[in-house]
Image (tube, rainbow, N blue to C red):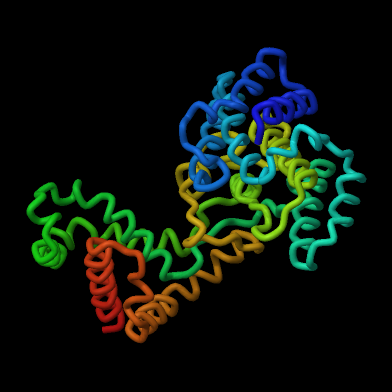
Amino acid sequence: MLRTTHKAIAENIASELGFSEENTKIFISGSTGPDTHGDFPHATGHNGKILSKIDTARTLFLQNDEYSYGELANALHYIRDKWTRNPEVETKQFVILDDNQFLKAIENLGFPKKAAEEYISVANMLLFTKNSGIESWFNHSWGIWHRDYSSCVYVFADILELMLPTLQSDASIVGNKENLKAYVKSETFKDATQNGFFASLITNFVYPKLAGYAAAMYSLASINPPTDYSNSVVDLNIAYRLSREIARYTLLPPDQFKYSDSWINGLKDKNGARMPLKYVIPQYHVLMPKSVDEVHKERLLCFDADAERFLKELSRKDASQVFRGRSETWIILFTRLTEMLRQNRILKRS
C-alpha cells in the first residue's frame, strides 16, 4: 500500500473513533513506521509481528501510554499491506465506500462462488462488528484451543528444543547426535522435564489459550484475503474496515466493553497469566465455537482416551509424516517424550 494511502486511512480511522489531536498525529505517523523497518515485503510473513504489536498496544493503552497509538498503527500497516495487492491503482481508485456501496461492490464482483462467499462473509462480519459490537459475531464464551492431543506434544517438543541450551549447556552434548540421544535418556533429563511435560499436556489440552475478547482480536487480526482472486477497491475497503475495528477494540476503555476479561483489563484470567496473542500458532490451535466450560468438560472426559489414541496412531504412522521439516534435535526430543508418555500410560494402567 502506498504511504499516502496508509496515512489517509489512519486519518479517517482517527476521525471516526474520536482520537485526540495528539494521538491522531501519533497514529498517522505510526501508520507508515514499518516502511523504515527494512522487513519487506510487508504483505506476507509478519503475522507474529502483527499480533505482538496489537498485544503491546493494548498493554500500553491500559497504562495510559500514548505510544499505544503508534504501536497499533504499525500493526495495522502490515494488515493493510496483506490486503493491498495492486498498489499501483490506488491513486485512481482510493475511495472509502459507504456500507451499502461496499456490499454492492462485492455482490457485483462476478467471482466464483467460493471466493464471493469469502468476501461476503468478511464484509458481513465487519459490518456487524461496526453496527452491533464485537459480541455480535463472536460469542464471548468461545475459546482458541489446541487442535488435538498430538499438538500438545508437538508444542512441548518445540519449547524443549528452544530451552535445550539452558537445560544442557555442554556444546559437546547438544551438538552431537549420539551424545544428545544418550543425554535425553538420562535421569537428569527425565527429572528436569517429565513433570513439566505431563503438566503441560493437561493444561494445553484442557484449557483454552485465549477466550473472550482476546480470541476475538486474534481472529480479526488473522483474517487473510482470498488467495486466487482480488479486487483493488473492495480489498482496500476491507483493509480500512478491518483496521478500524481492530483499532476500536484495542484502544477502547475497559468500562465500554460488555464483558470483563483479561483482554480488557490487562489482569490475569482464571487460567493464569494473560496469554499473548502471538503464542497462538495456527498449525497447533483452532477456534472452538462452543462455550469454554462445555469444551473443558468434554476434554477432561476424553483426556486419557485421546492419549492412548495418540500413541496408537503414532505407532502406525509413517515417521516421515511426523518428522517432515523437523530438525534432528527436535526428532530426538520428540522420540524421548513419547517414550516417557508410553511409560507413564503403562504405569497408570497397572
Q: Nearer the viewer, residue 94 or 48?
A: 94
Q: Nearer the viewer, residue 216 or 273?
A: 216
- Please state the horizontal and vertical placement of residue 48, each as a whole percent of the image: 49, 45
Q: Is residue 277 visible?
A: no
Instruction: Farthest residue to the bottom: give it.
Output: 316
User: How many discs appear?
Assistant: 0
Q: Is residue 312 above or below residue 164?
A: below
**In the displayed structure, does residue 336 sit left or right of residue 211?**
left
Quadrant housing residue 28: top right
Quadrant housing residue 130: top right
Residue drawn at (52%, 32%), measured in percent from left and top? 56
Residue drawn at (46%, 42%), measured in percent from left and top? 273
Quarter in which the N terminus is drawn: top right
- Please state the horizontal and vertical placement of residue 275, each as a whole percent of the image: 48, 45
Residue drawn at (56%, 61%), measured in percent from left and top? 286
**In the displayed structure, does residue 123 sit left or right of residue 76?**
right
Q: Is residue 169 visible?
A: yes
Residue drawn at (50%, 47%), measured in percent from left and top? 45
Q: Is residue 114 above or below residue 52?
A: below
- Please state the horizontal and vertical placement of residue 95, each as a whole percent of the image: 83, 35
